[in-house]
Image: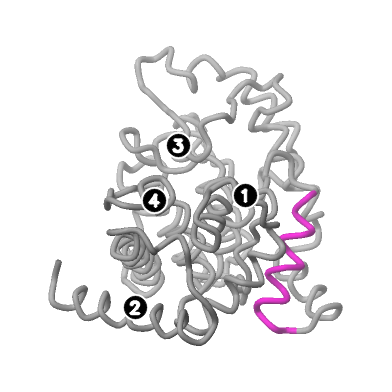
Amino acid sequence: MSPADKARALALTEAIGQYQEEVGSLPGIAAEGHLETLVAQIIDSLRRIEFVHHIRDARHDPARMDPSSPLFDPLKAAVLRSRRGEADEAWWLVFLATHFGKHITDGWRLARDVYGRLGQGGHWNWAATSQSPAALQSWFVSNEGTLRGSDGVTRRFSNHRQYESLRASSAAGTPRIVASYVAWVSPPRTHSDLVRQLHQSVGQDPQAVFAALYGSMDAVHRFGRLGRFDFLAMLGKLGIAPIDPGSTFLTGATGPLKGARLLYAGSRVADLSARHLDAKLAEFGRQTGLGSQALEDALCNWQKSPGKYARFRG
């Protein structure tokens, strides 16, 4: 552990100790090694957030926007598009990055080949997709075999999206998900219009807007709790949308909810509601200076191996 991480671990340990003195004990970290492991997972989570902030602030090769290039990266492309004032394309690229994910071996290949139409000419950018989701579905019908590897190239969803499908006819298929996303935005309304309309109804507080967007995404097919949390949080971290989660949104969660129950009751299956634990974690975050994203991620990973640190890559 680097000197900086040692200092951060000490500060976190002291903050958690202060929380227990002022608010109450945390049974989940009473066992030997549990506190140290939780702190290590929090540090990993903070590093992941800081890495995205680096993407937000760094200079990027324009080839990051080009799906014909092996350098293509939808998140870096989204930053570059956002800097150019192309907000719709930036949101769309983050959506594709979230839907397909970055596979541990294949990287961004699936997102790259769909966005770039397998090099057949043109892109499935926001303008083309939002104009005709049906055309995207037809393209999937024609190219489903290739996308699923008939050409010898593996293109796989990330671990978090491993149950999604490339079948054009499937209810879980990408074309149906994309069509529901387009309907959610509802062109000619833009993504920026969507945010402005929410400002009129809930105000401009970033956490209130995040919550309103989160709730409205019920309309997006197969974007459940994890998908929408990751999508919206990434938009905020990249500076593309003025939003920030003020909650861990545990309703519908699996790993983070188990982690919260373990922390507060000493058992992953304790009878504590998601709503109750959301409130407890909000208090924990205020007391320790930790944001909801770091807590959500850290608790999910910590509960998998609470007494012995293991590195997780998502």
Q: Residues within 10 Å of mark 3 (few under 14, many from 20)?
A: some
Magenta-drawn stretch contains 211: yes
Per the image, the residue denoted by label 4 is 73
Q: Are marks 1 and 2 in contact (CB under 8 Å)?
A: no
Asked whether 309 or 97 is in front, the reply is 309
Task: Of the two numbered discs 1 and 3 on the same chain, state the one appearing first in sequence.
Answer: 3
Judging from the image, what secondary structure is the residue with disc 2 in?
Answer: helix
Q: Which residue is mark 1?
A: 253
How many marks do you count on the picture?
Answer: 4
CA separation in Å, label 1 and label 2:
25 Å
Nearer-N-terminus badge (2/4): 2
- For marks 3 and 2, give the CA distance: 29 Å
Q: Residue at x 82, y 73 (%)?
A: 197
Tell me which numbered mark, 4 or 3, is placed earlier along the sequence.
Answer: 4
Front position among marks 3 and 2: 2
- Name the residue beneath numbered marker 2: 12
Kind of residue at badge 1: Ala
Residue named by callout 3: 159
Q: Which is nearer the N-term, disc 1 or disc 2?
A: 2
Q: For this rendering, which residue is in front, 281 or 184? A: 281
Sequence-first tag of 3 and 2: 2
What numbered label is drawn on residue 217? Answer: none
Quadrant for the N terminus in the image? bottom left
